[in-house]
Amino acid sequence: MDLILQVLALQSNSSVLGKEPIFPFVILLLVILVVPILFEKLKLPGLVGLVCSGVALGPFGGNLLPTQSPMMNLLSEIGLFYLMFVAGLEIEIKQFRSYKNRFLGFGGLTFAVPLMVGFLIGYLFGLNGNQAILIGSILASHTLLAYPIINRLGIARNEVVNVTTGATVVTNIGAVLLLALCIANRGNSFSFWQLITLINALIVYCLVVLVGLDYLGKEFFRRSGEDEGNQFLFILWTVFLAAVGAQLIGVEKIVGAFLAGLTVHNVIGSGPVKEKVIFLGSALFIPIFFVNLGLLVDITTLTTSMSLVWFTIFVTVGLIVSKLIAALLAKLVYRYNWQETLTMWSLSVPQVGVTLAATLVGYRTELLDISIFNSTIILAIVTCILGPLITKQVATGLRTIPTPEPELAASAYPAPKENANPFTIVVPIYNPQTQQYLIEMAALLARQTHGQILPLAIATAAAQMDAPQLENSLQRSEQLLAKAIALSRILDVEAKPLLRIDDAFAQGISRAAREQKANLIVMGWGKRTGLRARLFGNVIDSVIWSSHCPVAVARLVESPQKIQRILVPVENLLAPSLYPVQFAQILSETNQAQVTVLNVCERRTSSNKITWRRSQLSLFVSQLALPNPPEIQIIAHENVAQAILQAARLYDLVVLPFIHNRTSTGGLTISDVTSQLVNQLTCSIVMLGEPHNPQTVALPTVNSNPTATV
């Protein structure tokens, strides 16, 4: 009897849980957390897993997530706005000026050819003119889903990559404007004058958003100072304000979100606030949008309608072929080789951002039925798998800027002259437990470069300069500086203490380094976990973004004076950075340590390619003209992170580049090898962040006659 009562109680609790809005939200968060990771391990984009999860948990699967839930509809709507906002936010027209004619030309081709093919397919399957144009506009856009692959291969500055990236601007803007016209004319009741009125209203609206919000944003940012929280909220407000404005003139709301992204990018540029805005969308709202797309898919239509199957095949093949035709036409006009042409084609194949947003809007406005909606979802899944796979095969070995001659590269890192300012290292001190090792590392670098160290303490400002909180902060800072000066005397290194009152730690560090004309900032490890740290960043993120010089972020498990073996993983052989190797070599000279430059290639790499990689690394290292060249090591392994972890067991220090997560639209396909290494390495780590303009400051060359070690 008791057992029966317990079963009944459990069933009652389950029914209550099913009615609670928090229960589907828990499932939703679990899907967003786990599924993309699993699919990326299978070498598939994470967004494919999210859409498939929506299908599996929707009404045609486990029915665990309701399709008509107000919570789901609201979060999905925000995700839709966010998706279009990010699509506009990541467009930076200024960087394509040198390829203006070519990206406009290829953009026009890769927009017009799929548009015509999509229109013909729609007309062939009995759609009206308005619907056929919408199908064409859906095929015309594309998403740079494979950009992380391009970035990892080091060919992001290649001409065809820049041209294809610039063409994204043309295709996305064209697709969004065509969508607005098709939705407004969904009843085919537009007269000529109504069309002219809508176009005029759209032009005025675009000017108001692009000019008005631009002015309003710059004024707000100027008056709000460095408060990133307020800036973050202002950006979100502009997104929804622009969406409401679009709705008022009878245009689809996502047009406003897209234009808001274009405007906001001009206001905030590429900085920490932009990264945090994108992080919030790619971590929560955009994944929810993809899951909701899966909930709307009706898989029964795929098995009951042969016309739908043929329509899906025609649309998918038509897109792939039309994008290839556009790339071939660009090849004839601009005389690209076959590898460059296929790279352009593969980059323009994936259909994710604007395509899925336009499809959902067309379905909600009943311009597209469920069968066409299902076909477009399948199209997106197929192309976002196929495009990156082709890119990985055809783009490997694609060249970027020519490799500089050794003497030219070495001249970019001049040794300090006798009458020049000494090499200056700023060491922000806050944590007494890590202060000693940081000062020791800075002292090693300063002795080797004949420089000086500047211990820096920041006292956060208060409303009144005589506030007790500020007085306590000043006393604590003076104690830390006194300890740093005493330690520097023991190490026999010149040190000048700096005490600064500032509104925030990060801005105080960057400003003090700039005022002192510092050549390097050496910082301790900061907390990178927790919602606030991940959303609004920490001091390290802000310093690296704003600093004019390199920033070395150190997690030292033992005294730097004991370091004997240093490992420098180099992933990118086509456009490598000289900073990590140069930093490691300067540090190694103080202890007579051995530096190893490591590159990991695929397990199936042939011996000839391994030999080529070794020669590239040797050429890369020779550019520094080092007195004691580092050891070159090549490892063939299927997992880059695991290969580095295995090799690092024999080393005392690993020097890594500080790489921010770069997101394509949605940001769901990027795996950060650096994050894995940081979490699992047990030896000391130095992450080296480079300034945005590396030519403004350089590390000195290693002295061929090093001074005595500390």
Image (cartoon, rainbow, N blue to C red):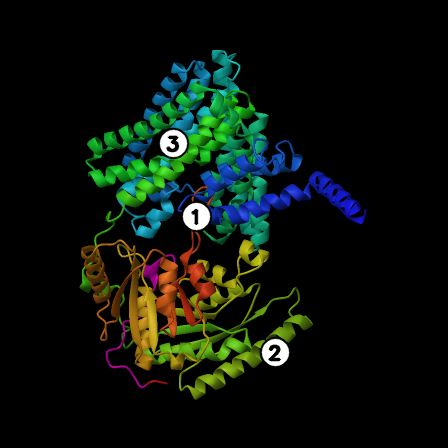
Q: Quadrant of residue 585?
A: bottom left
Q: Residues within 10 Å of mark 3 (few under 14, many from 20)?
A: many
CA–CA distance between discs 1 and 2?
51 Å
Disc sitting over residue 206 in the figure: none
Q: Residues within 10 Å of mark 2 (few under 14, many from 20)?
A: few
Front residue of 706/359: it is 359
Relative horizontal placement of residue 696, taking residue 287 as reference (left or right) = left
Residue 530, position in %: x, y? 58, 59
Q: Residues within 10 Å of mark 1 (few under 14, many from 20)?
A: some
Residue at left offset 21%, top offset 38%: 338
Amino acid tagged 1: Glu
**537 is higher (above) or lower (below) than 595:** above
What kind of element bears circle 2?
helix
**355 is higher (above) or lower (below) than 672:** above
Q: Which residue is mark 3?
A: 171
Q: Earlier in the sequence, mark 2 or mark 3?
A: 3
Q: Which residue is mark 2?
A: 475
* Numbered range of the magenta stretch: 689-708
Residue at left offset 54%, top offset 56%: 534
Quadrant position of the C terminus in the picture: bottom left
Amino acid tagged 3: Thr
Asked if the stretch drawn in magenta spans residue 257, the answer is: no
Residue 315 appears in the figure: yes
Q: Which residue is mark 1?
A: 40
Q: Nearer the viewer, mark 1 or mark 3?
A: 1
What kind of element bears circle 1?
helix
What kind of element bears circle 3?
helix
Residue 203 appears in the figure: no
Q: Nearer the viewer, mark 1 or mark 2?
A: 1
The overriding secondary structure of the stretch rendered in magenta is loop
CA–CA distance between discs 2 and 3?
59 Å
Residue 368, position in %: x, y? 50, 21
